[in-house]
Image (cartoon, grey):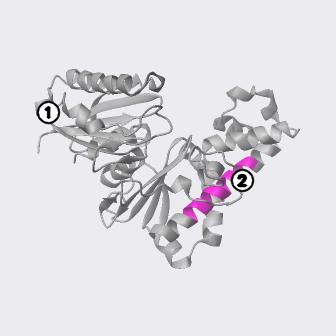
Amino acid sequence: MKKFVCGVDLGGTKINTGIMDVDGNILCNVKIPTEADKGPQHVINNIKISIIESLNKLNIDVSQIEGIGIGAPGPLNADRGVVECPPNLPGWIDIPLVDILKRDFDTEIKLNNDANAAALAEYLFGAGQGINNIVYMTVSTGIGGGAIIDGKLYNGANSNAAEIGHHTINFDGPRWCNCGNPGCLESYASGTSLVKFAKKHIESGRDTILKDKPSGELKAEDIFDAAKSGDKLALELIENEAFYLGIGIVNIMAFYNPEIIIIGGGLSSQWDVLYDKMMKTVDERALKPNRQICKVVKAKLGGNVGLIGAASLVL
């Protein structure tokens, strides 16, 4: 195997591309705006630019890398190399991304869901090393997931397995999620939903320091800050957030019976605030044998997990 692999973490707002060695070390990376509003061709050109700039930074060419891995928002089909209809990439309908990139880069190219790629990264190089049954859960703007089953990345029938953010926890809940269904986990436990619940209470007249923040500027971190200063509404919102995350974890334990659940994403930065609260719900509700065998831990790889995961698809 050659010494280098290239990873492309394609997000709705930025593209993070870099070169990694086979031990999981990022040797260089390039971040550029996705500019998704300019359409698929423009974004694909940005991907190509980011790959070329990454190669140039390390002073190597495409013949010296094992391949290029791409982690992209789903839905997509990994086997066909097609991005099907991601909500955060307007106009991307059945785009054969792998075939398009192969016209410019003569190397193996692998495509997979970004959360699946992150799960693979944590399995190979992060909190899941040496463990063969893993679920990775990212909690940020939305909620995504990926699963390693018996030491292999589990894609499902058409590459859309482990969409844990879209399993229903309240059949009569809010339709806040881009999937369009009411009451999915993402509508209750994501950073976006935390802010929406806060705004709903503010509009109803609740007394809170959060109302001093312009509505369009309110972020999840503001709610955590307010809770730390003793704001009653913020404390309630954090309690609910932890409860809903706990429900999600309970269901993951029932669905997959993993040895470890690894939680990453922006809200994992509030680990010390959320952990005990969400695990109280887990301990109360999870099937006992599933709970006994499963640890719940914070992800290790931080903000570059998507890039490491994308490159790991080639490994």
Residue furthest bottom as drawn: 289
Along the horizontal axis of the image, is 48 left or right of 126?
A: left
Give the position of the N terminus as an image quadrant. Answer: top left
Mark 2 highlights which residue?
239
Q: Which mark is residue 106?
A: 1
Residue placed at 71% from the left, 58% from the top?
172
Q: Is the magenta stretch mostly helix, strand or loop?
A: helix
Above-or-below relation of 44 to 280: above
Along the horizontal axis of the image, is 51 left or right of 142?
A: left
Q: Which of marks 1 and 2 is nearer the N terminus?
A: 1
Above-or-below relation of 146 to 43: below
Above-or-below relation of 288 to 65: below
Q: Give the range drawn in magenta.
A: 237-250
Callout 1 crowding tier (Cα within 10 Å): few <14, some 14–19, many ≥20: few
Please state the horizontal and vertical placement of residue 66, each as a whole percent of the image.
15, 40
Residue 246 forms part of the magenta stretch? yes
Residue placed at 42% from the left, 57% from the top?
161
Tag 1: amino acid: Asp
Dot 2 lies on which element?
Answer: helix
Residue 257 forms part of the magenta stretch? no
CA distance for labels 1 and 2: 51 Å
> Residue 107 lies in what quarter of the image?
top left
Residue placed at 63% from the left, 40% from the top?
192
Tag 2: amino acid: Glu
